[in-house]
Image (tube, grey):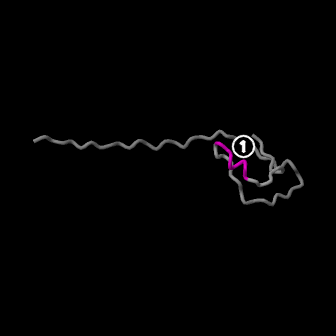
Amino acid sequence: MKFNMGSCTFCQFCADFCPKKAITLSTEYSMVTTDKNSLIFEGSFIKKLPPKPPAKKIEQKETKND
């Protein structure tokens, strides 16, 4: 997916309504450039899940019936 920051009005609607919460706005708003292509960013909705933590072993206490 491509984002053209030259068309951004900083309304934050894209971040507010993104169903995957993949869009965050930066505090950088002064975008001065002579090359319009430098304002085009590419992103993806594909994210890797974090690795699962190793399973904890549950120690079972042996109980003796007297």
How many numbered discs sit on the rendered protein?
1
- At x 77%, y 46%, the residue is 41
Query: Mark 1 Cα within 10 Å, few/some/many (few <14, many 20+)?
Result: few
Q: Position of residue 44 (x, y in %)?
A: 70, 41
Which residue has dot 1 on it?
43
Residue 45 falls left or right of residue 28: left
Magenta span dominant secondary structure: helix
- Locate residue 56, reporting x and y percent: 38, 44
Q: Where is residue 42, by image quadrant?
A: top right
Left or right of residue 17: residue 61: left
User: For the residue marked with disc 1, what is the amino acid?
Assistant: Gly
Taking the image as shown, residue 53 lies to the left or right of residue 48, namely left
Residue 51 falls left or right of residue 38 = left
Q: Quadrant of residue 45?
A: top right
Secondary structure at badge 1 equals loop
Examine the structure image and report whether residue 13 is included in the region drawn in magenta.
yes
Magenta residues span 12-19
Note whether 15 is above or below 49 in the view shown.
Answer: below
Residue at 24% x, 44% y: name it.
Answer: 61
Q: Going by the picture, which residue comes out furthest to the left?
A: 66
Q: Residue at x 72, y 60 (%)?
A: 27
Quadrant including the C terminus: top left
9 inside magenta stretch:
no
Of the 4 image quadrants, the one containing the N terminus is top right
Report the front residue among 45 and 48. Answer: 45
